[in-house]
Image (cartoon, helix red, strand yellow):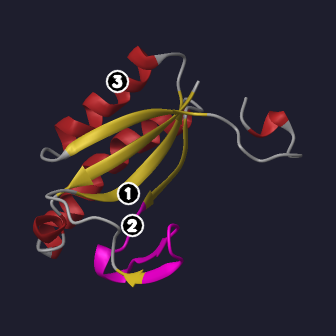
Amino acid sequence: MMYAILCYNNEAEVFAWSKEHNDAVMARLGVIQQKWEKAGKLKPSLRLLPTSAATTLRKSDDAVLDGPYAETKEQLLGFYLLDAEDLEEALSFVRELAAANPGGAYELRPVLLYNPGAPVTAFP
């Protein structure tokens, strides 16, 4: 099963980290990412720019807004795609991430292929 791992945290705090602190967190996460990549489980992972760089299209009235759709205490800061055997394996990955980068939350959401006409082999 493919899982999207959505990474939430307080954006103001994370983007205020010193370069040294950010580099240390990224190094700890890198160790975990390499382990899961070597196992063929970790797919693309992305870190999002701050919500101040976001643009939202509100579907109800086609309004284009600067920033995110909703103001919240924690923001979506990035995500991983993980090909896990089951939820327990996905939780194992997320627990490793949480130990390396405390604070915030991780949301695990199963992913279905949504690309009509694309070969199903795109996601094993």
Residue 100 place in picture, x, y as percent: 20, 42
Location of residue 83 in the rendering, given as x and y in whole percent from the top left corner: 57, 30
What amino acid type is highlighted by mark number 2? Leu
Q: CA distance from mark 2 to mark 3?
A: 22 Å
Tags 1 and 2 in contact by the CB under 8 Å rule? yes
Asked if the residues shown at circle 2 and circle 3 are in contact, with their CB atoms under 8 angstroms apart, the answer is no
| Numbered tag placed on residue 51 in the rendering | none
Q: Tell me the residue at 33%/38% (across/down).
A: 107
Which residue is tagged 3?
91
The magenta-colored residue range is 47-64
Q: Position of residue 2 (x, y in %)?
A: 58, 31
Is residue 50 visible in the rendered image? The answer is no
**SS state under label 1:** strand
Per the image, the residue denoted by label 1 is 78
Identify the image quadrant of the C terminus.
top right
- Which residue corresponds to mark 2? 48
The quadrant the N terminus occupies is: top right
Q: Is residue 99 left or right of residue 121?
A: left
- Which is nearer the N-term, disc 2 or disc 3? 2
Instruction: Please name the amino acid that badge 3 sits on.
Output: Leu
Query: Circle 3 — which element?
Result: helix
The residue shown at (32%, 49%) is 7
What residue lies at 39% left-to-right and 33% top-to-bottom? 108
Between discs 1 and 2, the one toward the N terminus: 2
- Spatial CA distance of label 1 from label 3 is 17 Å
Between 37 and 8, the one nearer to me in the picture: 8
Under circle 2, the secondary element is loop
Give the camera-side residue of 77 and 72.
72
Crowding at label 1, few (<14), some or many (≥20) Cα neighbours within 10 Å? some
